[in-house]
Image (spheres, rainbow, N blue to C red):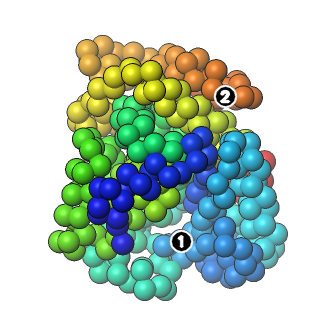
Amino acid sequence: MAITDAELLRSRFSGTEPGTVGFEEELLLVHRATWRPATAAAVVAVVDDPRVKQELPACQLEIATSVHTCVADAVDELRACRALITKACDPTVAAIATPVHPLLDGPAALSPTERSARLAARYREAIGRQLVSSLQVHLAFGDADCTLDVYHRLRNILPELAALAGAAPYAGGRDTGLCSVRPVIAAQLPRQGVPPVIGSWEQFAADLAWTVRGGVVGDASEWWWELRPHGGYGTLELRVLDVQATVWQTSAIAGFVYALGARFADLYRIGEPVSPAPAWRIAENRWAALRDGVRGELLDLRTGETRATRRRLHELVDAAEPYAPDGLDDVRIMVEHPPVEHLRALGAEAVVPWLAEVFNR
């Protein structure tokens, strides 16, 4: 259940080790003969590792890393878990990392669990259409007030991060014309997209209590915004990122997010104010990001001035680099050579075999 007491929330978010990080990564299993979804339960059973678990769709599994003090260690653990999954697959099955299955259209089978049945009763067919995969980055700050401050700074730049990570141009075997169709599919459920301003922990506790008390949600895991305070872990959970085809891409993006979090925490400590933008303005930029990726333009949240997304990302990378021990050159490569362009060059039919081939890179 959700923690709906403000003081307990403050205690949880102040009790974490500052500067720690962890990942959750959603993956799909496919049949090599058809490249269509395959059931994940048998592979999860063979892996037999608490870090690898079955997700809501029957073909989806999730890696959840341990808590780490540096991004590189978390990436190494993620790579090791991907290798465990590959080893557990029989020769007819492959694992892939894709935000949306490029060839599938329509509802997917759900795992036969009590949770699946409960969500299906609440959300009907829409829950079966949620075969979407993201990379979720958890950041801890060891200070509840700092956590809320960083929440609003990250909230303002969700479109920039989405543009960088956009990697889902295909659905149902067709090019959607978008750099990521994942948010469009996810939007069939409530509590998606740009999250609300959180004025205080008291407000957050009251909002959670309202949804739980009225039966709108079963627990806080259904608070599906693209950024959220995670009461169970005492972390900020960034959920806006498309899952990445390779571990190299994941490492680049996660290192950038971690550095941004560290920089924003410093801005809080020196007293630089943050101005949370209205959700609709961020949502306008969010739409531009999912449509055009890094090749598009975003509006200044205050003035409305148009700016190239690439320029904005380079500015953010330059500002965050002092907080990245290994530098951020890999992120600069992704800004200049966005992975979505390679996916488009392959074509929908060739994408899934390629995803299987590069899964452990």
Q: Nearer the viewer, mark 1 or mark 2?
A: 2
- Earlier sequence position, callout 1 versus callout 2: 1
Residue 277 shows in this picture: yes
Q: Kindly identify which residue carries mark 2.
A: 324
Helix or strand or loop: what does disc 2 sit on? Answer: loop
Asked if labels 2 and 1 touch by Cβ distance under 8 angstroms, the answer is: no
The image quadrant of residue 123 is bottom left
Q: Secondary structure at mark 1?
A: loop
Q: Residue 7, position in %: x, y?
A: 32, 56
Q: Residue at point 64% right, 62% down?
A: 63
Q: Nearer the viewer, residue 360 or 204?
A: 204
| Tally of numbered discs | 2
Residue linked to disc 1? 55
Of the 4 image quadrants, the one containing the N terminus is bottom left
Residue 61: x %, y % from top left: 60, 68
Q: Indicate left or right for 130 with 51 as reference.
A: left
Asked if one can make out residue 38 in the rendered structure from this viewpoint, the answer is: no
Q: How many neighbours does mark 1 have within 10 angstroms: few (below 14), some (14-19), or many (20 or more)?
A: many
Q: Residue at x 44, y 56 (%)?
A: 12
Q: x, y (%) of residue 21?
A: 61, 47
Q: Picture coordinates of residue 286 (x, y %)?
A: 36, 36
What kind of residue is marked 1? Answer: Glu
Q: Distance between the Cα atoms at labels 1 and 2?
A: 32 Å
Residue 210, numbered label? none
Q: Give left or right: position of 196 versus 136.
A: left
Q: Residue at x 59, y 31 (%)?
A: 259
* Residue at left offset 78%, top offset 74%: 88
Position of residue 269 in the picture relative to residue 339 (left or right) = left
Q: Please say if 3 is above or below 177.
A: below
Q: Is residue 105 left or right of residue 48?
A: left
Assess disc 2: are there few (<14), some (14-19) or many (≥20) residues with their C-alpha within 10 Å of its C-alpha: some
Q: Is residue 294 above or below residue 152?
A: above
